[in-house]
Amino acid sequence: MLNIPNAVPRYTILMTRRLLALAFLLSAAAFAQNRVFEMRTYTCAEGRLPDLLKRFREHTIDIFNRHHMESIGYWIPQDPERSKTTLIYIIAHPSREAATKNWQEFANDPEWKKVNAESNANGRIVVKTESVFMDPTDFSKIK
């Protein structure tokens, strides 16, 4: 500690830093608790799942990120029949209202319009879309 009169004690500085860090973490946790998860299931036309996966891998996820849609995970069912035509994924939005805004902006994104038109030039890839908005339980590892 410095021998300067009226100097702030070192433990006060450290404690202030710790309290600020704690406040930041608590506010982040509070914000995270308000987010909403969306599970989407896409059923593809026969033989088109590889095209959908390529579109997600090369374009869609980047466009999601641009529109504040956080990717949580992507899955293919293990069921032999559904594994040929189905993609299931979960994304997170800051709120249900934000989800509506995010999807509107996504649909109007020039890159998305171009990629969607190009990938559907030989027929629609996705023939059915299901969406479920979800809130985590108090014992969920993801909040």
Image (cartoon, rainbow, N blue to C red):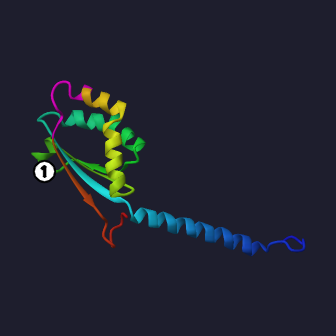
The kind of residue on which mark 1 rests is: Asp
Q: Quadrant of the C terminus?
A: bottom left
Residue 103 lies in quadrant:
top left
Q: What stretch is highlighted in magenta?
A: 118-127
Using residue 127 as the reference point, say whether residue 54 is left or right of it. right
Q: Which of 95 and 57 is in front in this view?
A: 95
Give the total of numbered labels. Answer: 1
Which residue is labeled 1 in the image?
79
Residue 26 in the image, given as x and y percentages of width and height: 51, 69
Circle 1 SS class: loop
Residue 48 in the image, given as x and y percentages of width and height: 17, 34
Q: Is the magenta stretch mostly helix, strand or loop?
A: loop
125 magenta-colored: yes
19 magenta-colored: no
Residue 45 in the image, given as x and y percentages of width and height: 12, 36
Using residue 8 as the reference point, say whether residue 92 is left or right of it. left
Residue at x 26% of width, y 25% of height: 118
Using residue 18 as the reference point, say whether residue 12 is left or right of it. right
